Amino acid sequence: MRSKIEKFTLIACGAIIGVLISLNLPVFADKAEKNNLPIDELRTFAEVFGKIKSDYVEPVEDKKLINEALNGMLTGLDPHSSFLNVEDFKDLNQATQGEFGGLGIEVGMEDGFVKVISPIEDSPAYKAGLKSGDLIMKLDETSTKGLTLNDSVKKMRGKPGTSIVLTVLRKGETKPLTFNLVRAVIKSQSVKGKLTEPNYAYVRIAQFQEHTGEDLAKLLKNLRQQNKTPLKGILLDLRNNPGGLLNAAVGVSAAFLPKGDLVVYTEGRAQDSKMHLTAVPADYLKGGGKDDYLKDLPEDIRTTPMAVLVNNGSASASEIVAGALQDHKRALIVGMQSFGKGSVQSILPMNNGTAIKMTTARYFTPNGRSIQAKGIVPDIIVDDGSDPSFMTKEADLTNHLSNPKDADANAASKDKDSKPVTPPVKKPEEEKKKTSDTPSGPIEPGSKADKQFQEAMNILKGLQIIQNK
């Protein structure tokens, strides 16, 4: 009769081998890695598993232990990989379709706490004044230290109408801030826009969702129709846009680029992670049966002078769009340096209804620039009033992926046109006026109070005058 440890060894080995096979990891495909499974490490895993089962202060289900082990295996790789149980996988699918319950915050992990990447526009978190870089210390009375990201997200989600208190540490503040939030059904309208004045259109994309490209096309057609004549300028606002679906980013880029232009390419180890995505329907339509939503777009939209607003909260898909338009010299990038999330996360469903979100590749702009831990540097820097030293970027996150290009070589290869125009340094007394003991409400994007928007519009008008000359 086998000992308990031997039994647990068989169980653990079987579980891990099953996971490896279901993921079709390169360990089985790569000739260079065709070695035996790490039996010693698997034995250690089984011993730990067995000790927990026999000696832990309370009984623990096998399923919980295995799920926690899988989650730890993924979250230890980088800040954006994770294991999704059945409920998490369902929530993720709902989020990409534009409707889900909760507070409306894109979050990551940093030093064991939950860090705000960007609040989703019009959400409870956005209206309450949470900002990119805020560190969530407590959810009600529960410390986020030691919780997994998925556990923290579960606590923030809940029945609409119920409340939760977030205790937040914000750089520049002398004491933690508290936010009393009421959960709501988050119906994120990803695309908004208006004619700010005759001949000038303002378009804001808050997140890249399933219908973002289609909604953008409808909006551009309506704005062009309202104006009655070709537009003289388009301002695309991608500030605090945390990203989203890759095909949506390609579709948005394709609305402004000539057909066939390269939008982004990816490089990874697996063959299907190497992609070249261009401004053609096959690369931005999800499924071959859909009609091309850009086929009736007025052709002058692709030649209208453009400026794109970005900031520290612009990440992932936002950076893909900004990078493509910058590399093709289609638009002037204005604002602050973006977040720098240049990695691809693939959602890989498992046979039991769970899934894993795993980093499988890096993004590169058409000119071969890696976004990872670098971000998009604006052509013209326009300060948004934040202290740059307090901004959180991808490069600040624990275990972030490195940029494959050497920093010096990358800097030397930059075109002169891409060098930012640096604003004047602010005086210390001006910086002191920015801090406050209480959280301030958000400024409505595209409003008179939005100084960054106003400056970008002035730049856009100047760009149109230069183009006419």
Image (cartoon, rainbow, N blue to C red):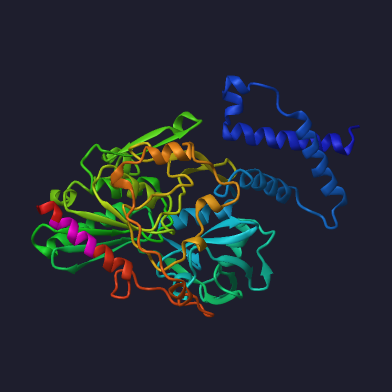
**Which residue is found at the position 38% from the left and 54% from the top?**
209
* In front of the other: 95 or 135: 135
Residue 154, x across and y down, in percent: 59, 62
Q: Quadrant of residue 180?
A: bottom right
Q: Is residue 311 above or below residue 256?
A: below
- What quarter of the picture does the N terminus occupy? top right
Q: Position of residue 344 (x, y in %)?
A: 47, 43
Residue at 43% x, 44% y is: 371
Question: Is 422 left or right of 219, judged from the image as shown?
Answer: right
Q: Position of residue 401 (x, y in %)?
A: 54, 43
Give the magenta-colored segment's residue range. 458-465
Closer to the camera, 428 or 239?
A: 428
Instruction: Specify the farthest residue to the top.
Output: 31
Q: Name the side, left or right, on which 448 lies relative to 40.
A: left
Q: Is residue 54 left or right of residue 216?
A: right
Q: Main secondary structure of the magenta part?
A: helix
